[in-house]
Image (cartoon, coloured by chain):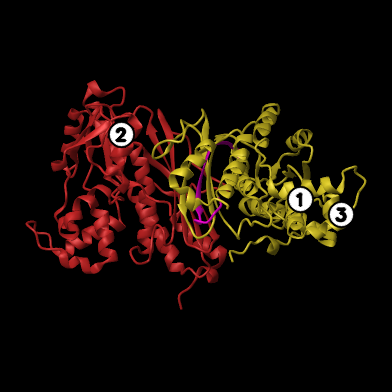
Chain colours: A red, B yellow
């Protein structure tokens, strides 16, 4: 028989969680120390519901935990911050298998530890539906805060990586028969490896926390750009098109896209056919950063990030060059 | 017809929430500034589920919001911290009346604003069950952190206020006919006022954020106690007995209670009969602070807090002088 939360009891549950938690976990609250010199704190929060944001069909408990951590770390990266700590609150039906929730904690903390941070607090309660509520806090140098509303006419638009891969992974998980459309292409990667890579893009997304320190280094070696901070942007968790639209709206500018520069991976062409570009623009959950910055800096950044690309530029006219923004509005219901 | 969340849509919902939020709400994350000089950050989190932690029978949406805020602010007070900011994530069934969630936000932010802090972020998603997940941040002077594990033999145990009132309010809300037991007592307070006071104790609890600054002032006027910080403790959200037991367990000490000093309000005698002391010791959710400190400091604190009392002392023998700790263990299911 599968052991459930109800059988384990509250004390057992707390003992189960303890090894995953930081020593900073305190009494009524976790004690975090002070902010680093010249840094500000940033805070982001997300709530994920079983059947709405994750499903057993596509997401193991480890993956559900990983994705919850990655989404919040990506929000920190999107502000230019480095992580400082994370808390998770969990609502559990009494018949939840102990192995399920332990898997969530394992995936969650695996992701945190990979990115140099840890779980510093939480709360666990009974609920009719599996619920994960995550709050992450980070620190950002006060002169290197990435914001949406500071894009300037003449900036180029750079993406730190490819888009559409998470969507492709999700579609393959929901409809495994789609894999029959995949063909051995010009690259030497096998179909099995392609499937594994696309699954991983959906199940184990990588927040781009390596980018903010890189931006700091680039600025130091490009003195003319040192101040004010010349980089704006956000992450592409709601899709590449959404990110560009949000930045333009917040900055009161428009965008001219270089359609040739928007990379459509071969596997997405094969899977999505004539909807390939839609997957890339509107798929979402790739957790790349979309940055607007001077061309010189963008070119220097391209040297450091193998999958980065300059996909357009910021223009004064407030239009989005053919992006269909009806696609990107995610309905609450 | 009552307007529901589903009819309002996501944009409408965001517009509804905006007036309740701080200007510090940012793009992907809220920007909070740096910690105050010589301060550390503390973080606490809670998740509340409809039917488990609140119910329409006893809690209006305004009260559910207030209680969610108060519980987290109380955790900050319990560490000796002052609030820095709060985020709330909300899971909502599509048929939730718009007025309900607006009531929650109103009660939540009313409580935050009363205590000088604000809502700096959040997330709203669809869920089969109403869910409120709150994370609060505070700051505490690094030499004035209240912890559980530092109670010392010879300290007295001080409570900042009366206990059992929240439990009495809850019982009156669940069983209004209980009010027939209330009698006009020696005080001139009417039965209606008593009922209103007990309802408020349950529905609008007051976190003791006024106490940490008071402790700071007292220490400055009592130089011998200036360093190391001589005060330990926690809040009594899980009951007075639980707080004393937790402090003793964490500090490796015991407690001798002064049963005569534990105040049982007249109304609780009338409502609970021979279970009155149980309500006071084990009722919970009064959000007072239970502090262990030298007698001189405790006496000075009594002058400032009209309902405070010295209810016992810390002893070396690890027993709790008759507290029945089976009462205090809250089962997960």
SS at badge 3: loop
- Residue in the foreground of this view, choosing between A307 and B146: A307
- Residue B165's label in the rendered image is 1
Give how far apart the Cα atoms at labels 2 and 3 are. Answer: 64 Å
Q: Chain of mark 3?
A: B
Determine if the magenta segment contains residue B120: no
Point 34% across, 39% down: residue: A78
Calculate the distance from the C-alpha at mark 1 to the C-alpha at mark 2: 54 Å
Judge the density around disc 1: few (<14), some (14-19), many (≥20) Cα neighbours within 10 Å: many
Disc 2 target residue: A248
Q: Nearer the viewer, mark 3 or mark 1?
A: 3
- Mark 2 lies on a secondary structure that is helix
Q: Residues within 10 Å of mark 2 (few under 14, many from 20)?
A: many
User: Magenta segment, which residues?
Assistant: B80-97
Query: Observer-nearest residue: A61 or B181?
Result: B181
Are both tags, 1 and 2, on one chain? no
User: Where residue A133 sits: x, y (%)?
Assistant: 47, 52
User: Which disc, if any, is residue B182?
Assistant: 3
Q: Residue furthest front?
A: B1
Residue A195 seen in this snapshot:
yes
Residue B115 can be seen in this image: no
- Which quadrant of the figure contains the C terminus of chain B? bottom right
CB contact under 8 Å: marks 2 and 3: no
Write the residue at 22% across / 27% down: A154
Q: Nearer the viewer, mark 1 or mark 2?
A: 2
Q: Is residue A305 left or right of residue B226?
A: left
């Amino acid at each position: 028989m599968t052991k459930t939360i109800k059988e384990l009891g509250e004390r057992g549950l707390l003992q189960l969680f303890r090894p995953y938690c930081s020593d900073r976990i305190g009494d009524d609250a976790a004690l975090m120390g002070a902010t680093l010199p010249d840094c500000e704190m940033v805070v982001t929060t997300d709530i994920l519901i079983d059947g709405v944001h994750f499903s057993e069909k596509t997401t193991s408990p480890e993956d559900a935990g990983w994705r919850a951590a990655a989404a919040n770390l990506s929000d920190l990266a999107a502000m230019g911050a480095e992580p400082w700590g994370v808390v998770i609150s969990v609502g559990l039906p009494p018949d939840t298998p102990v192995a399920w929730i332990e898997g969530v904690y394992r995936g969650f903390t695996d992701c945190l530890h990979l990115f140099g941070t840890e779980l510093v607090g939480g709360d666990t309660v009974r609920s009719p539906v599996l619920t994960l509520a995550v709050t992450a806090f980070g620190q950002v140098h006060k002169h290197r805060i990435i914001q949406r509303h500071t894009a300037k006419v003449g900036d180029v638009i750079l993406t730190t990586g490819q888009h559409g891969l998470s969507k492709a992974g999700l579609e393959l998980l929901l409809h495994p028969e789609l894999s029959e459309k995949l063909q051995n292409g010009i690259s030497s990667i096998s179909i099995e490896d392609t499937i594994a890579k696309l699954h991983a893009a959906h199940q184990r997304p990588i927040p781009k926390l390596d980018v903010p320190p890189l931006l700091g280094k680039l600025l130091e070696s490009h003195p003319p750009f040192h101040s004010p901070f010349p980089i704006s942007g956000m992450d592409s968790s709601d899709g590449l098109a959404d990110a560009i639209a949000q930045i333009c709206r917040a900055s009161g500018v428009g965008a001219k896209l270089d359609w040739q520069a928007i990379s459509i991976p071969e596997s997405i062409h094969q899977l999505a056919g004539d909807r390939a570009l839609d997957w890339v623009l509107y798929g979402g959950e790739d957790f790349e950063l979309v940055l607007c910055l001077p061309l010189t800096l963008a070119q220097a950044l391209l040297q450091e990030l193998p999958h980065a690309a300059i996909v357009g530029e910021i223009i004064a006219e407030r239009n989005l060059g053919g992006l269909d923004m009806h696609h990107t509005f995610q309905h609450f219901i």
